[in-house]
């Protein structure tokens, strides 16, 4: 029922929109799953995070893994306003979810309206050190997701060198600070304007899904349109770490935690 896939890019967004792609409704007593999203944002000289948790019951789900990478690039549309969506049945995870990271603990509560996302009361989020492990403690709901505590890694900071367009017929080399292990992915998006796209601004991207080794190459045949862009191309990059855990304490349930660090890094409220 649960298949393995490379991380999911929704509608051309560089940000990972969910740690599950292709959620389908259960049509009855489905399998409980939880999706945890955790990003890094700058706050002065440090960072904050604003974790979000959603619970669903599904008939099937394709989970994302940061250890599955193609080391290739593809061309696709880019729309900065696009958002992802799922029609899977939402369930509860109890009265609260506790998030503990970098010596601090805070509570996530279910939104009173809308998509029932569990999140912090303050948009400012909580301070943390990217790269530290995070613990999520789920209170549990007898009619929804069971009680569970998980520990997951978070994505560490990195820097990336702006790549240069090589001579015709040569691949582009992209370099960044490598991950500390083999369990992370690096997404790189080169945004540019294509006459075949919509609008005069950034409307197309070369999206690359690399192993986080510190270097990747963009295939030469993809670069001609980038080189002829009517506006300078923009580089966006994202380190991704995922952690899939399974509980079988009475009922089988899945929780997939995804942590990201982006460059340029969003600014915290």
Image: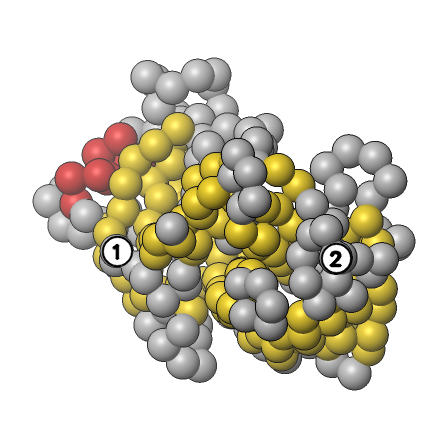
Q: Which residue is mark 1?
A: 70
SS assignment at label 2: loop
Identify which residue is drawn at 46% across, 32% down: 11
Q: Position of residue 164 (x, y in %)?
A: 32, 51
**Mark carried by residue 142:** 2
Q: What is the number of callouts on the image?
A: 2
Residue 70 lies in what quarter of the image? bottom left
Q: Is residue 149 above or below residue 59?
A: below
Up the image or down, 205 lies above or below 91; here it is above
Marks 1 and 2, how far apart in space? 40 Å
Q: Which mark is residue 259?
A: none
* Residue 130 left/right relative to 97: left
Q: Position of residue 246 (x, y in %)?
A: 52, 68
Secondary element under disc 1, as helix, strand or loop, is loop
Query: Which one is closest to the eye, mark 1 or mark 2?
Result: 2
Q: Is 31 positioned to the left or the right of 95 in the image?
A: left
Which residue lies at the image location 44% right of the left edge and 16% below the top edge?
198
Instruction: Give above or below for 105 relative to 54.
Output: below
Whether 138 is drawn above or below 197: the answer is below
Residue 227 placement (x, y as % from top left): 28, 36
Q: Nearer the viewer, residue 230 or 114?
A: 114
């Amino acid at each position: 029922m649960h298949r393995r896939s490379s991380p999911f890019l929704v509608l051309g967004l560089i940000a990972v929109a969910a740690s599950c792609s292709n959620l389908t409704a259960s049509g009855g007593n489905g399998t409980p799953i939880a999706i945890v999203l955790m990003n890094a944002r700058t706050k002065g000289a440090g960072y904050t995070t604003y974790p979000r948790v959603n619970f669903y019951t599904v008939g099937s789900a394709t989970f994302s893994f940061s250890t599955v990478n193609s080391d290739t690039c593809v061309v696709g549309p880019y729309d900065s306003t696009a958002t992802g969506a799922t029609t899977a049945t939402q369930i509860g995870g109890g009265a609260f979810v506790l998030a503990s990271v970098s010596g601090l603990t805070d509570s996530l509560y279910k939104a009173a309206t809308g998509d029932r996302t569990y999140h912090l009361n303050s948009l400012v989020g909580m301070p943390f050190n990217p790269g530290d492990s995070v613990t999520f403690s789920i209170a549990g709901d007898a009619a929804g997701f069971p009680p569970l505590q998980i520990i997951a890694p978070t994505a560490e900071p990195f820097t990336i060198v702006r790549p240069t367009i090589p001579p015709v017929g040569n691949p582009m080399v992209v370099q960044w600070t490598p991950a500390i292990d083999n369990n992370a992915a690096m997404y790189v998006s080169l945004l540019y304007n294509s006459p075949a796209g919509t609008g005069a601004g950034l409307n197309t991207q070369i999206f690359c899904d690399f192993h986080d080794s510190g270097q990747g190459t963009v295939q030469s045949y993809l670069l001609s349109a980038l080189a002829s862009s009517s506006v300078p191309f923009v580089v966006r990059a994202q380190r991704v770490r995922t952690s899939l855990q399974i509980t079988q304490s009475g009922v089988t349930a899945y929780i997939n935690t995804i942590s990201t660090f982006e460059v340029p890094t969003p600014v915290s409220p």
